[in-house]
């Protein structure tokens, strides 16, 4: 699915060594930017993938546990770990939310982006959607309708 959406490279961290593959794809340099919505055990691997002077953006903890990072790793890699709690912008900077949302709608209107809908479910089927979420049995979005 990622390749169909335009990804240059894909790594299945369930069957491939994430760190080795990132290093291989970057000629040993590591990733300049890591976007991490998962945390947990995956973060233990991704923090070893960051390039010198790179950035790790923490977006959430879908993996269930809040990871830790050693300060010496940040110093040696001259990297930054940045938190991004988008929901806080609604209260603290709503003008940014509106601006970004309008930009996304414009990109959608011109066909520059296309959301990936895995499944559309009714409220009666919401339990099966929750099962998909819990078991990571989907990609993209699950839409609930009336």
Image: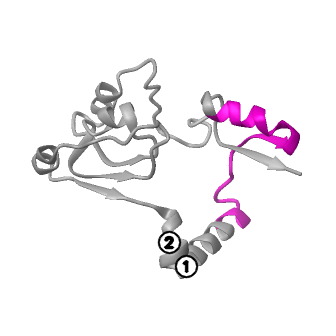
For residue 113, above or below residue 138: below
For residue 107, above or below residue 54: below
Q: Nearer the viewer, residue 91 or 143?
A: 91
Q: Which residues are magenta?
A: 107-133
Extreme residue in the bottom direction: 95
The answer to whether residue 57 is left or right of residue 118 is left
Residue identifier under label 2? 89
Extreme residue in the top direction: 15
Q: Is residue 125 at all visible to an observer of this figure?
A: yes
- In magenta stretch: residue 118: yes
Q: Nearer the viewer, residue 79 or 113?
A: 79
The answer to whether residue 74 is left or right of residue 5 is left
Label pair 1/2, CB-CB below 8 angstroms:
yes
Q: Nearer the viewer, residue 34 or 23?
A: 34
For residue 46, above or below residue 145: above
Residue identifier under label 1? 94
- In magenta stretch: residue 61: no
- Residue 19's spot in the image, x, y percent? 30, 29
Assess disc 2: are there few (<14), some (14-19) or many (≥20) residues with their C-alpha within 10 Å of its C-alpha. Answer: some
Label 1 and label 2: CA atoms lie apart by 6 Å
Q: Nearer the viewer, residue 75 or 145?
A: 145
Q: Residue at x 68, y 68 (%)?
A: 105
Determine whether the residue tagged by mark 2 lies in a helix, strand or loop. helix
The answer to whether residue 101 is left or right of residue 117 is left
- Residue 137's spot in the image, x, y percent? 65, 28
């Amino acid at each position: 699915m990622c390749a169909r959406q335009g990804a240059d490279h894909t790594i299945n961290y369930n069957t491939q060594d994430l760190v080795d593959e990132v290093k291989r794809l970057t000629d040993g340099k590591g990733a300049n930017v890591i976007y991490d919505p998962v945390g947990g055990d995956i973060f233990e691997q991704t923090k070893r993938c960051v390039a010198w002077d790179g950035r790790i953006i923490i977006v959430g903890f879908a993996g269930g546990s809040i990871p830790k990072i050693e300060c010496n790793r940040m110093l040696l890699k001259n990297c930054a770990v940045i938190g991004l709690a988008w929901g806080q912008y609604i209260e603290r900077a709503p003008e940014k939310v509106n601006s970004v949302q309008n930009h996304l709608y414009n990109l959608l209107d011109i066909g520059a982006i296309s959301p990936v809908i895995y499944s559309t479910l009714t409220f009666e089927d919401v339990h099966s959607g929750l099962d998909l979420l819990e078991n990571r049995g989907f990609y993209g979005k699950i839409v609930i309708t009336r």
